[in-house]
């Protein structure tokens, strides 16, 4: 997966995708005006809460320009505690070829794409949980090769 560095909504820091090597990453692109994004956020929060201690990371990239106030309201309304990254110049959005929202990528512990998911998903479903749990049981050494 292409590496990137983006500022966080909370301010004062930037996060880089490569910092999450060794962890399973769900990278999602979203906007406050996107109804399907709103629908899946509570499930994403629950999924992150369930698996964050087991090597799972969730990074949510907001693609809106100059809309931090609305983004903060949204994050507070849904009580989201996973990292929210800002991509106001659409540099990462373009690199990842994002067209529809939400679009999510699963990235393995070695930083490679496992899959792309377009549209909102039932992240709290048994199938989604089984998928995440089984991926977390995979090789944990980022330097190991298949």
Image: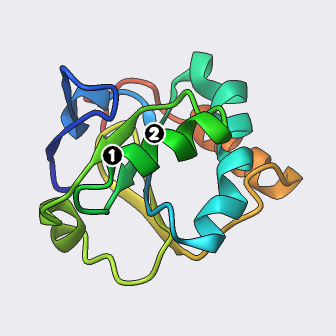
In the image, is 138 to the left or to the right of 106?
Answer: right
Query: Looking at this rendering, what residue extends furthest in the front direction?
Result: 69
Label 2 belongs to which residue? 72
**Nearer to us in this view, 113 or 15:** 15
Q: Which mark is residue 68?
A: 1
**Nearer to us in this view, 87 or 116:** 87
Q: Residues within 10 Å of mark 1 (few under 14, many from 20)?
A: some
117 is higher (above) or lower (below) than 24:
below
| Residue 80 in picture, x, y percent from top left | 59, 34
Query: Looking at this rendering, what residue extends furthest in the bottom direction?
Result: 99
Q: Residue at x 17, y 66 (%)?
A: 90
30 is higher (above) or lower (below) than 12:
below
Q: Quadrant of the C terminus?
A: top left
| Residue 83 in picture, x, y percent from top left | 42, 32
Q: Count of labels shown?
A: 2
State the SS at label 1: helix
Q: Quadrant of the N terminus?
A: bottom left
Residue 134 appearing in the image: yes
């Amino acid at each position: 997966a292409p590496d990137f560095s983006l500022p966080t909504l909370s301010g004062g820091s930037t996060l880089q995708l490569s910092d999450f090597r060794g962890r399973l990453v769900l990278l999602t692109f979203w906007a406050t005006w996107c109804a399907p994004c709103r629908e899946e956020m509570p499930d994403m929060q629950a999924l992150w809460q369930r698996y964050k201690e087991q090597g799972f990371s969730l990074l949510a990239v907001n693609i809106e320009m100059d809309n931090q106030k609305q983004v903060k309201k949204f994050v507070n309304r849904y009580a989201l505690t996973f990292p929210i990254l800002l991509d106001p110049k659409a540099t990462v959005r373009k690199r990842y070829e994002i067209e529809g929202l939400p679009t999510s990528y699963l990235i393995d512990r070695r930083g490679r794409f496992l899959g792309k998911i377009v549209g909102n998903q039932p992240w709290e479903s048994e199938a989604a949980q089984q998928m995440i749990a089984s991926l977390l049981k995979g090789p944990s050494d980022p330097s190991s090769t298949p």
